[in-house]
Image (cartoon, rainbow, N blue to C red):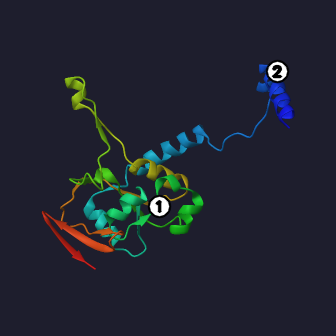
């Protein structure tokens, strides 16, 4: 058996580069050009769908509207906007989305970490500050799941998506949070937490 394996390996090594280059294999199911097309379309589509918390809150009162949280399951479990569905962004697929939001015409509200201020534990900032020069100190890069979530939803046919565009304090009295870990709803007011079951 060892002899057969060694002979096979030696045969493969002896193959010329040109023969290896001629080998055919199935291509990965990723198309950069398709992604660029979807991204360009989604970018234009998104411009009129950035909304304030007041509009976000008003839309969320409709029982046919879904709030979608695409952060990690751990962060979602610790704190999320009351009623938000969860699908980790890494698990995005047409079939997984269809399980939680079967109708692509459904209105979906999305939010992410950069929408919340003063909560580094559960809504950690993804802003990167460049420290070297004084000019670079003024620059920031902001990264979050809002934009890729919007692009992917658009690509999967969910075009009725609205994104929370407002920065909100953790202590904003308008927001009700849920914690799946503790099965509780919280409204954070300044330094007080009011818990209701």
Q: Is residue 102 visible?
A: no
**Mark 2 highlights which residue?**
14
Q: Quadrant of the C terminus?
A: bottom left
| Quadrant, the N terminus | top right
Question: Which numbered marker is on residue 87?
Answer: 1
Q: Secondary structure at mark 1?
A: loop
Per the model, the C-alpha gap separating discs 1 and 2 is: 49 Å
Q: Relative to 152, does residue 87 appear above or below in the rendering? A: below
Q: Residue 187, how many percent across, how many down?
A: 22, 69
Q: How many residues crowd around disc 2 within 10 Å: few (fewer than 14), some, or many (20 or more)?
A: few
Tag 1 near tag 2, CB within 8 Å = no
The residue at the point 43 percent across, 74 percent down is 64
Residue at position x 61%, y 40% from top?
31
Circle 2 SS class: helix
The image shows residue 5, relative to residue 52, as above or below, that is: above
> Quick check: 1 left or right of 55?
right
Residue 168 visible in this rendered orientation of the protein = yes
In the rendered image, residue 88, in percent from the top left (x then y), is placed at 46, 57
Tag nearer the camera, 1 or 2: 2
Q: Left or right? Give the position of 75 relative to 130.
A: right
- Locate residue 131: give its quadrant: top left
Q: Residue at x 41, y 62 (%)?
A: 68
The first of marks 1 and 2 along the sequence is 2
Quarter of the image where one finds residue 13: top right
Q: State the image quarter where residue 25 is shown.
A: top right
* Residue 50 position in % (x across, y down): 34, 53
Near-viewer residue (144 or 35): 144
Looking at this view, is 1 or 144 the one in front? 1
Residue located at (82% from left, 23% from top): 19
Residue 175 location, x and y as percent?
Answer: 24, 66
- Which numbered dot is residue 157? none
């Amino acid at each position: 058996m060892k002899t057969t394996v060694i002979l096979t390996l030696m045969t493969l090594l002896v193959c010329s580069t040109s023969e290896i280059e001629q080998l055919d294999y199935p291509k990965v199911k990723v198309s950069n050009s398709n992604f660029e097309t979807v991204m360009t379309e989604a970018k234009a589509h998104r411009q009129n769908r950035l909304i304030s918390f007041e509009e976000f809150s008003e839309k969320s009162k409709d029982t046919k509207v879904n709030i979608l949280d695409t952060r990690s399951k751990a962060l979602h479990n610790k704190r999320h906007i009351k009623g938000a569905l969860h699908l980790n962004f890494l698990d995005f697929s047409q079939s997984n989305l269809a399980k939680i939001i079967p109708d692509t015409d459904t209105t979906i509200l999305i939010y992410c970490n950069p929408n919340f201020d003063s909560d580094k534990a559960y809504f950690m900032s993804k802003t990167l500050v460049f420290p070297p020069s004084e000019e670079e100190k003024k620059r920031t890069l902001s990264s979050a799941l809002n934009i890729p979530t919007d692009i992917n939803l658009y690509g999967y046919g969910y075009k009725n998506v609205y994104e929370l565009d407002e920065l909100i304090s953790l202590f904003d009295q308008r927001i009700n949070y849920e914690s799946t870990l503790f099965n509780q709803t919280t409204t954070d007011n300044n330094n007080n937490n009011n818990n209701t079951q």
